[in-house]
Amino acid sequence: IGGAHLGAQISCDPDTMLPDTVAVDPFPYTADNPLAGITDTACVGEPFATVFQINLPTEITINGTVVGLNGATIAQSNAILNLPSSMTYACNPGDCVYTAGEVGCLVIYGEATADDVGQHDLKIAVTLDIGIPIAQTLPNAAIAPGNYYLNVKPEGSANCTVVNDVPEITENGFDLRVMPNPLSDYAEVQVVIPTADDYQLTIFNAMGAAVQQETLALPAGEGYFTLDASRLPVGLYVFTLRNNEQAASGRILIQR
């Protein structure tokens, strides 16, 4: 996932590893895909940034009809509805014109104030070029159903990266490395586990759906386990390894 560079000039890096099947990362949150949506959480008084990766296809489906897509344009200001007033955004490319078949990104950034605390249901005003310009507000039921909820927490809140209805999990709480990657059927995952526990390994496909899960009893310290991808089709996947307190994630590319 391309990151954001904080400083006088805010920017983001496009993720050239995105598969063609992924038009935007993250996908919107839905009840069927609760791990999607904006997983970064802002805290009052702390610098914040969250990145959208954009990889527009050359065709899209609108209300069941497939149409050609040349690209999409977002206004360089005020195009994200319900965005806290303390925040803004920047595009890559800088003119916010995204060409179909080319990878770009958008970063939302700022420092939240006390007035921003709460959940913000973000919508993006975009003009799609399908031979003629059509204005859309995304997400929407016709093209991309779901929601992009941006959560802002009070100053001093802990673990301001993930908001769940369950106890909060510290993301990137430990190190892991996949070897080899890309892989064919199996890989060895090197991990440094802070606490011996049962950890859940979940693999998600490019659409954000969980396609494989297993529970691993892992000891504290450096260790290894085998990741079995033999039943998965070729493609790019995201995986998470977590217990009730800590989590880490990564990407694997399956090639055969």
Image (cartoon, rainbow, N blue to C red):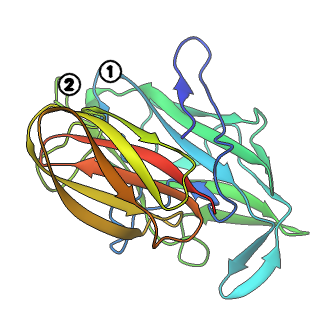
Q: Nearer the viewer, residue 70 or 74?
A: 70
Identify the residue position indicated by label 1 in the image.
46
Element carrying mark 1: loop
Q: Is residue 121 visible?
A: no
Residue 2 location (% of width, % of height): 57, 36
Q: Residue furthest left?
A: 196
Residue 53 against residue 95 in the figure, above or below: below
Q: Residue furthest top?
A: 8
Mark 1 neighbour class, 10 Å CA radius: few under 14, some 14 to 19, many 20 or more: some
Q: Residue furthest right?
A: 131
Instruction: Tell me the residue at 73%/87% (across/down).
Output: 65
- Of callouts 2 and 1, the N-terminal one: 1
Count of all numbered marks drawn on residues in the image: 2
| Residue 62 falls left or right of residue 42 | right
Q: Nearer the viewer, residue 180 or 118?
A: 180
| Quadrant location of the C terminus in the rendered image | bottom right
Element carrying mark 2: loop
Q: Nearer the viewer, residue 254 or 3?
A: 254
